[in-house]
Amino acid sequence: MNVSDTKPTRDPNADSEDLFAQLKALVTSLQGKKRAEFGRHVSLGDLFTERDGNAAAYGFGEGTTMYDNVLVLGNVKVGRKTWIGPNVILDGSGGLEIGDFCDISAGVQIYSHHTVRRTISMGVDPIDYCQTKIGSGVYIGPNSIIQMGVTIGDRVIIGAGSFVNTDLPSGVKAYGIPARPGNTTDDQDKR
């Protein structure tokens, strides 16, 4: 074989470095656009997706939006015009229904299963599943946890950092660990 017959080889490290530089420039550009348009910095996935498209991909209701980093498990149904914030867990392993016009704040965790009995029985007992339901017009404050099997009525306000392990009727404010009803949301309307 003649030396003139061989093709020069490219350095794979140089190709990787070039691709990395291009990706970094793209991410920087997209972050700048997001900051200029919305005044926010978001995770990488949210630079490449739109929140309404994320929700639509799961068949959630019209006008519902969710961040790219929301963890969705199992059978989750969400109504119209619901906002699902960043770092949320929606566990539909046992079935999860969320109504219309809800706000689910950053870091909220909503469960429909747990592994407590399976764990303490050393795998003898099964995983427990139970449907969780959230009505319409519900505000769930940041970092709150909704336990499996809980039903929350309509027009409920759940305070930040609350642990909800019992059903809540419509029209109440609940907060704490565990969350307990306080005033009604009708009191909110009288301000």
Image (cartoon, helix red, strand yellow):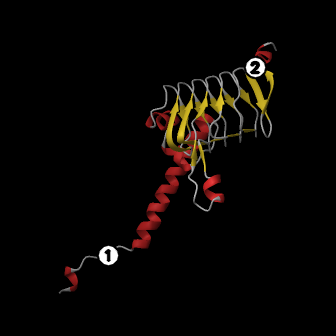
At x 39% / y 72%, what residue is drawn? Answer: 12
Name the amino acid type tagged 1. Thr
Q: Quadrant of the N terminus?
A: bottom left
Q: CA distance from mark 2 to mark 1?
A: 70 Å
- Pick the front one: 30 or 62: 62
- Pick the front one: 90 or 106: 90
Query: On screen, 151 above or below 146?
Result: above
Asked which quadrant contains residue 151, the reply is top right
Query: On screen, 144 above or below 78?
Result: below
Asked which quadrant contains residue 89, the reply is top right
Query: On screen, 166 above or below 47?
Result: above
At x 35% / y 73%, what residue is drawn? Answer: 10
Please give the count of numbered marks on the rendered protein.
2
Lower position in the chain sequence, tag 2 or tag 1? 1
**Tag nearer the camera, 2 or 1:** 2
Residue farthest toward the top in the current orientation of the protein:
190
Q: Do tag 2 and tag 1 residues touch (Cβ < 8 Å)?
A: no
- Pick the front one: 64 or 48: 64
Name the amino acid type tagged 2. Thr
In the picture, measured across the screen, residue 150 lies left or right of residue 23, that is right
- Residue 9 bears which disc, if any? 1
Secondary structure type for disc 1? loop
Q: x and y percent of residue 30 in the render?
A: 53, 45
In the picture, measured across the screen, residue 87 lies left or right of residue 49, that is right
- Residue 186 bears which disc, if any? none
At x 44% / y 61%, what residue is drawn? Answer: 19
Q: x and y percent of residue 179 in the render?
A: 77, 35
Task: Identify the residue under disc 2.
Answer: 185
Query: On screen, 190 above or below 139?
Result: above
Q: x and y percent of residue 83 in the render?
A: 59, 31
In the picture, measured across the screen, residue 182 lies left or right of residue 153, that is right
Secondary structure type for disc 2? helix
